[in-house]
Image (cartoon, rainbow, N blue to C red):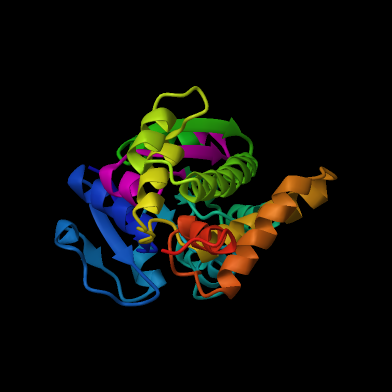
Amino acid sequence: MTQIAVLGLGIMGLGMARNLVASGHEVTVWNRTPRELHEDLTGASVAATIAEAVADQDRVLTCLTGPQAQRDVLLGDDGALANMAAGSILADATTTDPHMTAEVAAAAAAAGVAYLDTPVFGSRNEAWEGRLDWVCGGPAKAFEAFKPLLEDMAATVHYMGESGTGTHMKLIGNLLVAAQMVSLGEALALARKVELDHDAVMGVLDVTDFSSGLIRGVGRASFKGDFSPSFYLKHMLKDARLIGAFATDQGVPLPMSGQVQQLYQAALNEGLGDLNASGLHKLLFRLSGLGA
């Protein structure tokens, strides 16, 4: 059994904390917005402040909404790093930009804390069921020490290398996720327009060599008009912006990804930000002259 603090109980962090509790660890949780814990987290302790949550903890896991949330929660006199003990390890599952990762890593080093950038692939169901894919950057020794905890929440765990490489891999992977979400929506719109049977379409998409878990799961949900959030559309737009900035820093042109970002911006402008990332399909359906 390991003591660990989890900061951030959103869609993803809640599932992470649940699996740590289920694995028998002593978990302390904190969230910026106080909330009633799910019954599966009744074994966790609830901290009133960040300082209380991380006090005397050798392991801390954060899962936040982005760079500004990292700045608010991790940095500053009231932040986690100012209150963590030297020699402890902070694993950060936030999807963020490489500059923020470098800033937090430097602040952690100054505090004597080992910092791991450990974002994940997966959404609500994978987090809840402990089937996330972790991509990790940072000191190898700290990674090996934290890895058993990650494995309690994981389908797979991947060590990418030095600090920042987990963040890099996450943005590269999300580029593919966002692009596939758009192309799937266009394909479904075309299938609906010519009135192909939805079950027949999915029967083909289930078995082809260009299929994926996203196509199989999201395709069925979008055909049914189910856009309940597992990963918010507004967060996909945030990630698309981070991907664009990352590519610009590296001098890599992303002409198609730029168009994807603009489509997500248009979907947000249509009031779809609190739907699942596949809520973009509602916009594509409307542009195709299709109803709900």
What span is in magenta? 121-141
Res 149 → quadrant: top left
The image quadrant where one finds the N terminus is top left
Q: Position of residue 226 (x, y in %)?
A: 35, 58
Which residue occupies the foreground of this view, 155 or 103? 155
Foreground: 68 or 88?
Answer: 68
Most foreground residue, 222 or 44? 222
- The extreme right residue here reads 251
Name the residue: 37% across, 58% down.
Answer: 225
> Quick one: 264 or 118, which is closer to the camera?
264
156 left or right of 106 in image: left
Q: Provide residue 45's location: percent of width, then percent of height.
A: 22, 64
- Number of numbered discs on residues: 0
Tell me if I can see residue 211 in this picture.
Answer: yes
Q: Residue at x 25, y 47 (%)?
A: 19
**Camera sees residue 103:** no
Q: In the figure, residue 286 lies in which quadrant?
A: bottom right
Q: Is residue 139 magenta?
A: yes
Asked if 122 appears above or below 69 in the picture, the reply is above
Q: Which residue lies at the image location 64% right of the left edge and 36% below the top edge?
A: 162
Task: Give percent across and percent down for residue 112.
Answer: 55, 53
- Pinpoint residue 150: horizontal percent, then vertical percent: 38, 40
Quarter containing the C terminus: bottom left
Does residue 69 show up magenta in the picture? no
